[in-house]
Image (tube, rainbow, N blue to C red):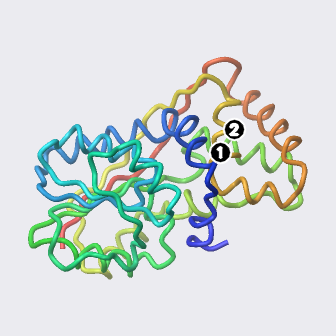
Amino acid sequence: MTGVDADRRWSESMPAVYEQYLVPAVFRPFADDLAARVVALRPRRVLELAAGTGVLTSGLLSAVPHAEVTATDLNDTMVAFGAARAPGAVWRQADAQRLPFPDDVFDLVVCQFGVMFFPDRVAAYDEVRRVLAPGGRFLFNTWGPLATHVFAAALQAGLERALPVDPPRFIRTIPHGYADRAVVATDLAAAGFAVEEEREITLEGRAPSAADVALGFLAGTPVRAEVEKHGDVAAVQDTVTQQMTARLGPGPVSAPMTAYVFLCSA
């Protein structure tokens, strides 16, 4: 499965599940971190790529209320959901490799956990540089290795227990498939970016139960399509939930999650 194939396999029901079960546990802590970093940059015109259901978009609207925020996503389902969730932004469907904006428009381009999905990352970074005004910045994060994201590692272990012959590979190869910081820096340099700052951060994810996290990944991400190929979705979900509960514990669960944050200039 290529990055673009995985990204386009978001059905109409998935954003709501993603928003309910994954955003609070996995994505909001890092959205808060990025929004706080944006404050120090004081942008006037912000473009967000791969905005998803709008968790970072909402953070941007609160953190820099005087900025004009344009939020984009490749998927119409995400754009529709995000526009309802964060109506203060201008929402547009857009492919990061072919942005529908003129040159030199934005002070800041920001992306939360989206660059891993770009099939041609250098082409996407070229587009980011094109739409940035002189002196503009590119701020984004990407997940660290799978083992450093305890929720995702527990999920993958459960999938491999449930489907040992042909386990789903989406989590390993897409969200956690761009975890070599040297590769990221090389791609950025190829597009004409200099890395001003690079940080490794580890934040805590919290959820009411391991079952909630399992449901979020299994029904709210492209893992769903991979599991459906095997037929017995309910049996897979039961096994994954049991394995994740055994690893993470019953009741409320927490887990460390590591990401890398890049601040770049052209």
| Amino acid on which the number 2 mark rests in the picture | Ala
Q: State the image coordinates of residue 161 (x, y, percent, origin top left).
A: 84, 46
Q: Position of residue 205 (x, y in %)?
A: 50, 32
- Residue 149 occupies quadrant: top right
User: Badge 2 is on which residue?
Assistant: 214
| Residue at figure coordinates x 78%, y 48% from the top left | 159
83 and 191: which one is in front? 83
Q: Nearer the viewer, residue 143 or 41?
A: 41
Q: Residue at x 49, y 52 (%)?
A: 144
Q: Position of residue 177 (x, y in %)?
A: 56, 63
The residue located at (47%, 31%) in the rendering is 204
Q: Is residue 246 left or right of residue 257?
A: right
Q: Secondary structure at mark 1?
A: helix
- Quarter of the image with the C terminus is bottom left
Question: Where, by quadrant of the figure, is residue 167 drawn?
Answer: bottom right
Q: Are marks 1 and 2 in contact (CB under 8 Å)?
A: yes
Q: CA distance from mark 1 to mark 2?
A: 5 Å
| Label 1 sits on residue | 217
Q: Which mark is residue 65?
A: none
Mark 2 lies on a secondary structure that is helix
Q: Nearer the viewer, residue 109 or 204?
A: 109
Instruction: Inspect the image, locate mark 1, and give the three-letter code of the amino acid beneath it.
Output: Phe
Q: Name the foreground residue: 251 vs 103.
A: 103
The answer to whether residue 171 of the structure is visible from this angle is no
The extreme top residue here reads 251
Q: Is residue 148 visible?
A: yes
